[in-house]
Image (cartoon, rainbow, N blue to C red):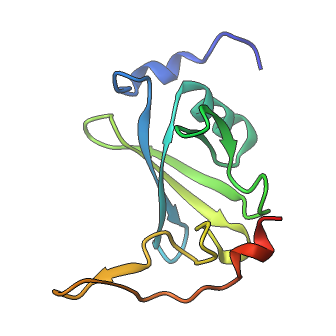
């Protein structure tokens, strides 16, 4: 990829670290699968590949979703919110697993008034996903 990034990236309101929050939503079910961050290069690569590429804040590098697990996200739509500071990806989730815990969604814990409880099953043991 060339060092010149597309002009359309300028419409996004990036934070002081050059990042934008991203919500991945499953095409069809509309389940919210996960939340992550992108920098300009990650968003440009997502458009180029047609698969989600995020910015890992902990590893300080681009992260092609599914690069280790095989659970890629095929991007069908990219939307920008009204304030132009949040990106929504409508994705097809490979393997039905978006979360590193082996669940369909990262939002598997529900508050019941007293505490948080897992309400979604583990579909695949993470030990078998990440070798």
Look at the image and tell me in which quarter the N terminus lies. top right
Q: Quadrant of residue 122?
A: bottom right
Look at the image and tell me in which quarter the C terminus lies. bottom right
Q: Position of residue 16 (x, y in %)?
A: 34, 21
Q: Quadrant of residue 55?
A: top right
Q: Position of residue 104 (x, y in %)?
A: 57, 77
Image mark count: 0
| Residue at far top of view | 4
**Left or right: 83 in relation to 120:** left
Residue toward you, 49 or 35 = 35
Q: Is residue 131 above or below residue 4?
A: below
Residue toward you, 26 or 128 = 128
Q: Which residue is rendered at x = 80% and y = 76% of the image?
A: 128
| Residue at far left of view | 113
Q: Is residue 117 above or below residue 57?
A: below
Q: Position of residue 31 (x, y in %)?
A: 46, 73
Q: Quadrant of residue 74?
A: bottom right
Q: Which residue is rendered at x = 38% and y = 26% of the image?
A: 14
Q: Which residue is rendered at x = 63% and y = 53% of the image?
A: 75
Q: Position of residue 88 (x, y in %)?
A: 44, 50
Residue toward you, 77 or 61 = 61
**Left or right: 67 in relation to 23:** right
Residue toward you, 49 or 130 = 130
Q: Which residue is rendered at x = 66% and y = 85% of the image?
A: 123
Q: Is residue 17 above or below residue 89?
A: above
């Amino acid at each position: 990829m060339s060092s010149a990034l597309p002009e359309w990236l300028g419409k996004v309101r990036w934070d002081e670290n050059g990042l934008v929050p991203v919500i991945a939503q499953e095409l069809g079910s509309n389940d919210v699968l996960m939340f992550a961050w992108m920098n300009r290069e990650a968003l440009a690569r997502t458009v180029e590949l047609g698969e989600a590429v995020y910015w890992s804040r902990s590893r300080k590098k681009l992260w092609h979703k599914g690069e280790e697990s095989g659970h890629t996200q095929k991007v069908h739509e990219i939307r920008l919110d009204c304030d132009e500071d949040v990106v929504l990806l409508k994705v097809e989730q490979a393997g039905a697993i978006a979360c590193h815990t082996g669940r369909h969604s990262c939002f598997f814990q529900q508050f019941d008034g007293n505490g948080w409880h897992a309400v979604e099953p583990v579909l695949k043991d993470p030990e078998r996903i990440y070798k």
